[in-house]
Amino acid sequence: MRLGSSRCPGHARTWHRHIGMSYRPAAAPLGPRRVPLRFLLWALLVGLASTGCAQRGYDDYVPSPQLARRALEDALQTWQRGEHVHTLDRGDSVPVQPVDSAWTAGHKLRSFEVVGETHGDSPRCFAVRLWLDNQNDEQLVRYYVLGIKPLWVFRQDDYDMMAHWECPPELASREQPRGMALTATASK
């Protein structure tokens, strides 16, 4: 009888405990290595997730001229119909988010004319003639269109204020709330 063999089924694996040895079963025969399914699924998930995390460049945020013009016209038509500023969900296309302080202030747009694309601080800049209800004169305004989803349609004045962290004049003239001003005694 060989050492460790027995007629008892579990005895071959437990005899080593009696003499203080550790038991290591013989290595599995060499053959093709099997990769656990869990590892494959995890690797696939990480691979798919990393493809969506690719960095976007500047040009990715510049819409095509046709898409930008259509977004601008959609925003101005919404204003002309008298609707409030909101994200325009166009169903089949990219949503549009207009930013226009005159529209937000409640001015009514009587009509408009998109003169065409022009140069500006944004790659998609359009010159637009606006006729408001409360004014007889036309206004020549620039609009910037940028973004992916949504497409942002900024009036140039609003874009400049946002880009330079400026406060509109009507808000800048307001008194600051108590406790907001920093003084030399408060900083001690």
Image: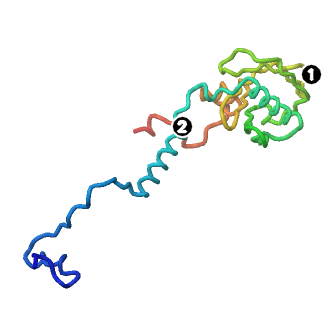
How far apart are the two marked residues, 2 and 1, measured between alpha carbons? 42 Å
Question: Is 110 above or below relative to 14?
Answer: above
| Residue bearing mark 1 | 136
Counting other residues with Cα less than 10 Å from the Cα at mark 1, is it few (<14), some (14-19), or many (20 or more)? few
Q: Earlier in the sequence, mark 2 or mark 1?
A: 1
Q: Are marks 2 and 1 in contact (CB under 8 Å)?
A: no
x and y percentages locating residue 75 in the rendered image: 80, 33
- Please tell me which residue is depicted at 85% across the width and 23% down the height of the picture: 130
Q: What is the secondary structure assignment of the residue under circle 1?
A: loop
Residue 154 percent location from the top left of the image:
72, 29
The image quarter in which residue 24 lies: bottom left
- Kindly report which numbered mark, 2 or 1, lies closer to the viewer in this rendering: 1
Q: Quadrant of the N terminus?
A: bottom left
Element at badge 2?
loop
Residue at coordinates 20% horizontally, 64% vertically from top-left?
A: 26
Q: Amino acid at mark 2?
A: Ala
Question: Where residue 180 sits: x, y (%)?
Answer: 55, 40
Q: Is residue 29 left or right of residue 108?
A: left
Q: Dot 2 corresponds to which residue?
A: 181
Q: Quadrant of residue 128?
A: top right
Q: Is residue 133 visible?
A: no
The residue under the point 77% across, 42% down is 89
Residue closest to the far left: 19
Q: Nearer the viewer, residue 109 or 106?
A: 109
Q: Position of residue 92 (x, y in %)?
A: 78, 41
Q: Is residue 36 above or below residue 3?
A: above
